[in-house]
Amino acid sequence: MQQSSPLTSGFGSRADGEIVIGEIGPVAESSSLVIFGITGDLARKKLVPAIYDLAHRGQLPAGFDLVGFARDAANSEPVLRESVITHARRPFDPEVWHTLTQRIHLIEGSFDESPAFTRLASLLTTLDHRRGKPGNYVFYLSVPPSAFSTVCGQLAVVGLNRPAQGWRRVVVEKPFGHDLPSSRALEGVLAQAFPPSSVYRIDHYLGKETVQNILALRFANGMFEPLWNNRHIDHVQITMAENVGVTGRAGYYDGVGAARDVIQNHLLQLLALIAMEEPVGFDADSIATEKVKILSATELLGPLEHTSARGQYGPGVDSGLPVPGLTDEIGFPPDSTTETFAALTIGITTRRWAGVPFYIRTGKRLARRTTEIAVTFTPPAHGSPAARAAAVSNVLVFRVQPDDGIELHIGAKRPGGGMQIQPVSLGMDFRSVFDPAPEAYERLIGDVLRGDSTLFPRRAEVEHSWRIIDPLLQHWATAGRPDTYPAGTSGPVSADRILSRSGREWRAL
Ligand code: BG6
């Protein structure tokens, strides 16, 4: 899309026939991005490669500087270079990297070391003078939530949180707390230093192009919305399956588990996009308003012993090779009760959705990697006994990854005599139609630099998500050990029972 094309807010069409929804957004202003924890896992695997990809596409604003802050930041250039070579989407181009390194500045220091923050303040001022920038700073907290308070406090001491001129934005990563009270406490910490409008909460699923396409499919087409309710939809399944385990992630994952790691954030965001009402516009406020409304009407369905399941992977196989169980992974205690699989049932108490179960499941070390949302329509109720026997449930599937696309399952007559119905599918692969989309972090970092908060969950969304899953976490806290499932399978049998009670089945992995 060309930035110069005339755009409308709401639906509209451009001269070249492409349909646009909403504004593309503001242009990024000259700014400095400070990453706290530049040598950490996330920064190396996602953030620095995404910044390199933005540089490669010429999408960084003029006058951009990247300041990396970490205890071991000095001399980390070779590490960052390596991370770009390994993880960036675009091929490594020494010239692009060389140009970018002219804009990378590293500050060595720990978060409780005041002189390091004084050095940071003076570096930012120097960069502003050198490039004639007004003092626009993004602070990316790529650090554990336990460090938020120290970093925000130090920024406040040196006056970096309040702009004399320019703007301040602060970016925080999940996990945003471990339950509702702790999430509120973290918000309190941020609110002391930064106004609410400058806080960007990252949920990288919202940066995925297929996830944004949920709204386009629902609201840019006329044929789905009339059916999008409990008269025509039987149930919805949201699946995020991964074949990887949590090797090397014990420090983060043990005690966190699957529900906090991805259901509280990524999967409830997918649910909100599938279930929300049409926003009055496609701007950040209108979309957030609808997401908050639907999440506030969302709750766990019980009794939890029947409507939820929890599992932990045991030894098994991945791609034909033996892999250890969770408690044999380095860093996990033998008696760890951390769940690597979680499944639950959600209900939405609106007129549109009353009575439609939303089943959510996620797991590590499952049979394959797939994230999808499957909307199953109610089979036709009328017709002759023969027609009823032949009826199929239509399923609309949003394939988020790895083969992003959309498919619709319908029944068709098999050639030959009689009326033999066979399920067939109509499909669309995004990759065969569109150019490859930016990686999620590339998109989201670009949005922060442009000040577009559309793809960032608001505080109320995060808090509703905790409210929704907290009762399940409390239930599990006293429910003993999770069930075990062999690595490389589709999870514990207890998950199948959630659906079989109502005569339904999970989609095959
Ligand atoms: C992260 C979780 O948020 O998402 C990880 O912490 C998970 O446990 C990852 O593996 C999955 O992201 P993606 O984009 O590969 O689906």
Image: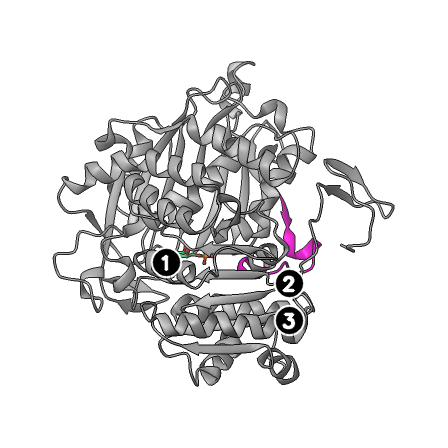
Q: Are marks 2 and 3 in contact (CB under 8 Å)?
A: no
Q: Where does label 3 land, which residue?
A: 55
Going by the numbered disc 2, the residue's amino acid type is: Pro
- Mark pair 1, 2: CA separation: 23 Å
Q: Is residue 336 magenta?
A: no
Q: Is mark 2 within 8 Å of ligand 1?
A: no
Residue 482's place in the image compared with 65, above or below, is: above
Q: Quadrant of ligand 1?
A: bottom left
| Nearer to the camera, 125 or 347 | 125
Q: Is mark 1 within 8 Å of ligand 1?
A: no
| Nearer to the camera, 78 or 106 | 106
**Magenta segment boundaries in residue numbering:** 426-442
> Total of numbered circles in the picture?
3
- Mark pair 2, 3: CA separation: 21 Å
Going by the numbered disc 1, the residue's amino acid type is: Gly
Q: Quadrant of residue 361?
A: top left
Q: Quadrant of residue 343?
A: top left
